[in-house]
Amino acid sequence: GGEGEVVRHRSPQTGREVEYVLRSNTFGFGDEEWRRVVAVVCTGAEWQFKGWPFGSARECVREVLGVCFFWEDEGPPKDAVKMGARCVGMGRGKSQSQVAAFLEFWKRVDEFLMKKKPGLMY
């Protein structure tokens, strides 16, 4: 997994600042790292979840928040919809649409964290 990049996000729901570590892969994750996984940005491809401890891709996006960004003119990838990922559309060349997608992502992360992993909010 490597060290990752630390990102701090202030939840509008709680007002708390939560620290996230962004990683490009999960290689070498132990039980503690898996316990702390909150979200995955995915395309809907099953191979993205190879080696994950939760089973199928569909089961993975039940355990962690699966988010798939897509261009609105193309529509969401069918595999991402099928596995239950939350699909967030963006307009091409529309920066306000991309900012809205960014804000939607963090809103969904906050909601998921409060509902499924409230112990990680510190």
Image (cartoon, helix red, strand yellow):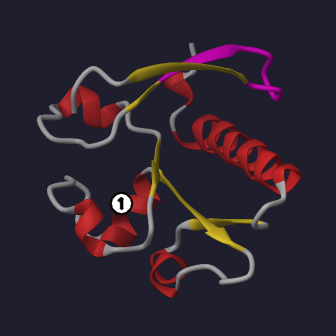
Side of 94 where 78 appears, left or right: left
24 magenta-colored: no
Q: Is residue 72 left or right of residue 76?
A: right
- Residue under the point 72% across and 45% down: 102
Task: Give the camera-side residue of 53 and 79.
Answer: 79
Which image quarter is the N terminus in? top left
User: Residue 56: x percent and y percent?
Assistant: 27, 71
Magenta part of the chain: 11-20
Query: In the rendered image of this protein, does residue 97 appear above or below residue 116?
Result: below
Tag 1: amino acid: Cys
Residue 73 vs residue 103, the one in the foreground: 73
Q: In which quadrant of the rendered image does the C terminus lie?
A: top right
What residue does disc 1 label?
60
Q: Residue at x 53, y 67 (%)?
A: 85
Whole-percent x, y for residue 28 in the image: 11, 35
Image vertical order of residue 66 relative to residue 26, above or below? below
**SS for dot 1:** helix
Q: Which secondary structure type mostly characterizes the magenta part of the structure?
A: loop
The image shows residue 81 at horizontal and vertical percentages of 55, 80
Which of the 4 quarters of the picture holds residue 121? top right
Lateral position of residue 53 relative to residue 71, left or right: left
